[in-house]
Image (tube, helix red, strand yellow):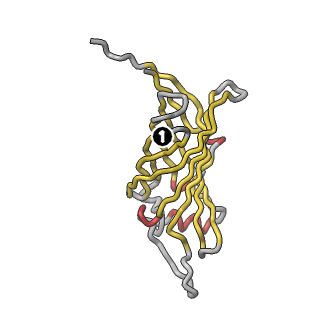
């Protein structure tokens, strides 16, 4: 059986999160530095193993003071936990894709299940084979140790516990590895 290794093309991918602020609006943030791989035995990525890492210091919410607070010990604690990581598998149940695995943030590991929209495979103008995915899901930030909280005088929560994850990922095919089955 052969397997194919794919890596994330960071110039055609984005990793974002959305969280409610004051319960009335949504703040969007991005991880600007990330990497990941998928290893698959089939063109439809069924049972592909996935590894992913994002640098906490690369958080960008378009507001420097907020970014600094997110990197502090109140939230991600970038000094002691410089990366968030994920290891899991893609499953395909009749065209319904899921990405299930262990997400680790701030030293806390939890299983998460994310919805996957597989966009397909094509060749780019430079002869590279690419695969595209849109990945979405929700997590509780407090389950990962991001427990900072504040309440306004009117009783509104400043930062919601629920965080939406939204990844648009383009993978580049790297290599095909042939494995030879042992014969008796």
- Would you identify the image quadrant in which residue 19 lies? bottom right
Residue that protrudes farthest toward the left in the picture: 184
Residue 161 percent coordinates (x, y):
50, 68
Residue at image point 59% right, 61% down: 18
Q: Is mark 1 on a helix, strand or loop?
A: strand
Residue at image point 49% right, 47% down: 53
* Above or below, comparing residue 12 to residue 184 in the picture: below
* Above or below, comparing residue 155 to residue 11 in the picture: below
Q: Which of 26 and 34 is in front in this view?
A: 26
Asked if residue 101 lies left or right of residue 152, the reply is left
| Residue denoted by label 1 | 90
Residue that protrudes farthest toward the bottom in the picture: 153
Residue 180 percent coordinates (x, y):
38, 16
Residue at image point 50% right, 36% down: 38
Residue at image point 38% right, 57% down: 107
Check the picture and name the quadrant holding the N terminus.
Answer: top left
Residue 129 percent coordinates (x, y):
63, 28
- Would you identify the image quadrant in which residue 108 lies? bottom left
């Amino acid at each position: 059986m052969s397997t194919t290794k794919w890596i994330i093309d960071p110039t055609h991918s984005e990793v974002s999160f959305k969280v409610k602020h004051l319960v009335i609006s949504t703040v969007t943030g991005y991880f600007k530095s990330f990497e990941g791989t998928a290893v698959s035995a089939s063109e439809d990525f069924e049972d592909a193993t996935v590894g992913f890492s994002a640098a906490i210091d690369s958080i960008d919410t378009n507001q420097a003071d907020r970014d600094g607070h997110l990197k502090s010990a109140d939230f991600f604690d970038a000094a002691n936990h410089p990366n968030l990581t994920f290891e899991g598998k893609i499953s395909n149940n009749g065209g319904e894709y899921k990405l299930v695995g262990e997400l680790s943030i701030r030293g806390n590991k939890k299983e998460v299940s994310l919805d996957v929209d597989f966009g397909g495979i094509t060749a780019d103008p430079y002869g590279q084979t690419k695969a595209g995915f849109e990945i979405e899901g929700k997590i509780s930030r407090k389950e990962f140790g991001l427990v900072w909280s504040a309440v306004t005088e009117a009783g509104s929560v400043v930062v919601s516990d629920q965080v939406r994850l939204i990844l648009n990922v383009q993978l580049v095919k790297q290599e095909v590895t042939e494995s030879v089955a042992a014969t008796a």
